[in-house]
Image (cartoon, helix red, strand yellow):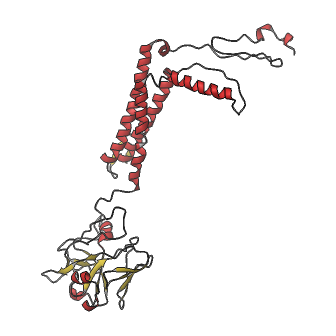
């Protein structure tokens, strides 16, 4: 069908110069480009008071985002990890998880809502038709892009509307702090819990097999005995935590065979007490060789000489086993004369 046969009402109309809409007649296409609808100004475009209200609304949402981020950080401090609360309709939930999800969700939501409200009420909403162009941009196109970017920046009011700009920067700056708080989930802060054990002056040494206090005569030369502090029971809720630090191994060596002077001073009649926890990765030591007085960790074969301050003579362990100073009380039972002189188990980053 030729263009002469197209009814006049279907022919393309002229260019809409007011809005930039262009209709192009194509010889073999009977349908005209409808163009763009005429632009209708918003109230914010013609009333500065309305624009100010929108500006305050956007700033208010960015401020709420900042407050929610602060609430997210505060939740880590306020709510214990094991606190359970009832919240309708969710039922019994973790107070910490609920608070973290609520505050972080609010922080992200208000940033998004503020940005959307800013774009819909204050940024330019004029639609512009642009022709398709080759993938490789020409210098003219690059210049146009930069020009459009500058125009968009000017229309956004970033420089003129400082309240929005400052509150947006504040919200975007605080939200990443939420990610830093997630580092807490790597584990609780050790504080001084890794440096001390239950052992204290006057606590008796309790045989872990018989659960009876140990007397010097109960420890024979060449034997290996395991002990725990008086007052610690296998039924205690924190038994595993405490025994993991306080587990003790006791051997009796002829005093003349003890090479380390301090070890001899901290012993009682050749009975020496060392931590049972390997200083490599914390495995319990349980293999003892009577003739050499060596103990072997079964996990990675770290070997310690109990006659020479429990120093490392083989394997990956980094330092000697800590020794517990012991004596005998007025009832004739072995007792501790204090805690270990250094932290037990593997080294850790803040150990001095």
**Where's residue 50, x and y in %?**
43, 15
Q: Is residue 339 above or below residue 84?
A: below
Q: Is residue 327 above or below residue 101?
A: below
| Residue at the front extreme, as displayed | 139
| Residue at the top extreme, as displayed | 8
Q: Nearer the viewer, residue 126 or 141?
A: 141
Residue 130 visible in the snapshot: yes
**Where's residue 207, x and y in %?**
26, 80
Question: Image point 66% across, 11% down: which residue?
Answer: 17
The picture quadrant where one finds residue 231 is bottom left
Question: Image point 49% across, 21% down: which residue?
Answer: 121
Number of numbered tags placed on the structure image: 0
**Where's residue 315, x and y in %?**
43, 78
Position of the C terminus, as image quadrant, is bottom left
Q: Nearer the viewer, residue 320 or 102?
A: 320
Q: Is residue 102 left or right of residue 213?
A: right
**Where's residue 85, x and y in %?**
33, 46
Q: Is residue 32 above or below residue 69?
A: above
Question: Image point 53% across, 13% down: which residue?
Answer: 41
| Residue at the right extreme, as displayed | 1
Residue 334 visible in the snapshot: no
Position of the N terminus, as image quadrant, is top right
């Amino acid at each position: 069908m030729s263009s002469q046969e197209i009814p006049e009402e279907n022919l393309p109309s002229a260019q809409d110069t007011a809005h930039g809409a262009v209709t192009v007649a194509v010889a073999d296409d009977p349908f005209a480009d409808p163009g763009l609808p005429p632009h209708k100004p918003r109230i914010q475009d013609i009333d500065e008071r309305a624009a100010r209200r929108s500006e305050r609304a956007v700033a208010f949402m960015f401020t709420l985002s900042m407050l929610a981020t602060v609430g997210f950080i505060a939740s880590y401090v306020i709510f214990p990890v094991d606190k359970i609360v009832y919240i309708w309709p969710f039922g019994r939930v973790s107070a910490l998880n609920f608070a973290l999800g609520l505050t972080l969700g609010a922080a992200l939501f208000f940033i998004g809502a503020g940005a959307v409200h800013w774009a819909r009420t204050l940024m330019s909403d004029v639609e512009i038709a642009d022709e398709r162009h080759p993938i490789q941009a020409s210098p003219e196109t690059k210049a146009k892009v930069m020009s459009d970017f500058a125009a968009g920046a000017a229309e956004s009011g970033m420089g003129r509307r400082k309240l929005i700009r400052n509150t947006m920067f504040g919200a975007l700056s605080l939200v990443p702090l939420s990610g830093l708080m997630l580092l807490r989930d790597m584990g609780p802060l050790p504080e001084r819990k890794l440096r001390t054990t239950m052992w204290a002056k006057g606590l008796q040494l309790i045989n872990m097999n018989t659960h009876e206090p140990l007397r010097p005569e109960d420890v024979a030369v060449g034997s290996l005995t395991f002990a725990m502090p008086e007052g610690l029971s296998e039924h205690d809720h924190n038994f595993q935590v405490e025994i993991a630090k306080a587990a003790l191994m006791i051997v009796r060596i002829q005093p003349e065979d003890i090479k380390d002077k301090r070890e001899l001073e901290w012993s009682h009649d050749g009975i020496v007490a060392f931590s049972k926890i390997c200083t490599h990765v914390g495995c319990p030591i349980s293999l003892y060789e009577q003739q050499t007085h060596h103990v072997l960790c079964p996990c990675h074969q770290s070997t310690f000489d109990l006659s020479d301050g429990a120093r490392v003579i083989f394997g990956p362990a980094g330092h000697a086993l800590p020794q517990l100073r012991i004596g005998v009380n007025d009832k004739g039972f072995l007792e501790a004369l204090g805690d270990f002189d250094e932290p037990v188990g593997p080294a850790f980053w803040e150990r001095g």
